[in-house]
Image (spheres, grey):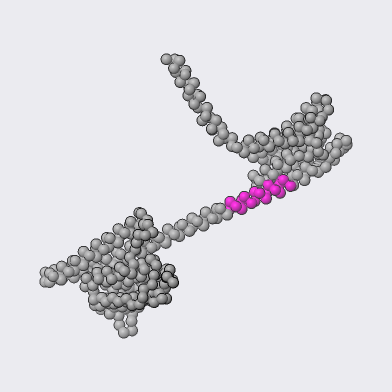
Amino acid sequence: MAFVQIAGAQASVQAAWPARISAWLRRRPVPDAIDVALAVCCFAGFTLPVLLGAGSQPASRLAVAGFGVMASAPLVVRRRWPAVTCAAIAAVYVAATVTGVQFTPFVSNAGPNLAIAVFTLADRRSRTLSLPVASGAAIATWGVLRLGLHMHPALGEDAVQAAAVVTGWAAGDALRRRRTYRRRLELEARRREAEREGRVRAEERLRLSREVHDVVSHSLSVIAVRSGVARLLLTERPAEAETALAAIESASRTALDELRQLLRQIREPAHDQEPLAPALDDIPDLVHRMRHGGLDLSYRSNGERPDYGEATEMAAYRIVQEALTNVVKHSGASSASVELAHTRAGLTISVIDDGQGPPSSGRTAARAGHAARQGFGITGMRERAELMNGSLAAGARPEGGYAVVAVLPVRNARP
């Protein structure tokens, strides 16, 4: 039993090793391996030739190897601590100049170590940190030149390290600024995309609110008027009361069907081939329902009908529906007419009634009726027309009655 437990524990430990290795790799990303390879290449390319050609004195070789390692090893952590790396390598070059140890084959121990460190510092840190540290490294390596020449006149010295610092910092700072600029562009693009999406959603909410307003306002107006008629005629003229109740039933069913269609559009966007909204072909049915509701209504369509596009046809239907709703609710009209005039330039919609507003009970009632007709319904119709690059005019006629005239230009017309 104990053997089985020990074997199970060993198996669990062995199974945990891949997870530990994976976690270690996540903590030590691939760029760390690149930094290690970079440090090894700097040592092998610039210090190893000096070791292979150096004299037989162990101390000299040990000093060369030591300075070579100290100048290359900090590059392993250059991404994590760039300022410390830059300062450490600059200190190594200053110490090598003072002690007279030449750990590269070139004058002033020329090599890429310090330039790489400064480049990383300027690339990964802001100017408020990178510029003072890089300036300090350049001044230190340049300022120690006179002391090195005085102490070791046999060794040549020049300002190559200071030049490397300036070049490395300029390249790293340019790369950092370019990356910052691209990041700002991406953030701006995402912000604009979020704003565009917000506008699209707001427009969709406005469109749906208009659709719901048109459907509910029209249907409830018909239901209210016809229910009042049915209540008054129920006992005296039951046949007419039955007709009014049938109109109420038809209007309520139509409203429910259109509301279900709107909700279906919200929940499940339809395919491109599925009709999403009423069109011009549905206007005769609308007129028939209004006639069935008791309004003396005529309908006429003139001209050859072009292809307006789905959005224009839906806007035309809603304008007619809202205009007829206003006739029922506010005008007190006994008759009305709907006329559609098709031309190559566009569609002209005319809804005219003979109403004079609400029953006369003084100027206040007349003003209230006129204000109601100029309320959200007229505004909504005008906004629908303008959204299609059209126009809408509504107001009292000089010869009596009220007129709504909308002009919708052809959109997506076939040549």
Q: Is residue 18 above or below residue 112?
A: above
Q: Where is residue 386 drawn, in percent x and y?
A: 42, 70
* Residue placed most toward the observer, 148 or 403: 403
Q: Which residue is at 77% across, 45% downward? A: 163
Does residue 353 appear left or right of residue 200 in this picture? left
Q: Name the quadrant of the C terminus.
A: bottom left
Q: Residue 182 magenta-drawn? A: yes
Q: Which residue is at 42% across, 76% downward? A: 345
Q: Quadrant of residue 366?
A: bottom left
Q: Where is residue 297 drawn, in percent x and y?
A: 25, 75
Q: Name the quadrant of the N terminus.
A: top left
Give the farthest residue toward the bottom.
399
Does residue 208 appear left or right of residue 67 in this picture? left
Q: Where is residue 56 drawn, in percent x and y?
A: 83, 25
Q: Is residue 285 above or below residue 171?
A: below
* Residue placed most toward the observer, 235 or 49: 49
Q: What is the span of residues highlighted in magenta in the rendered image?
A: 167-184
* Residue placed most toward the observer, 120 or 5: 5
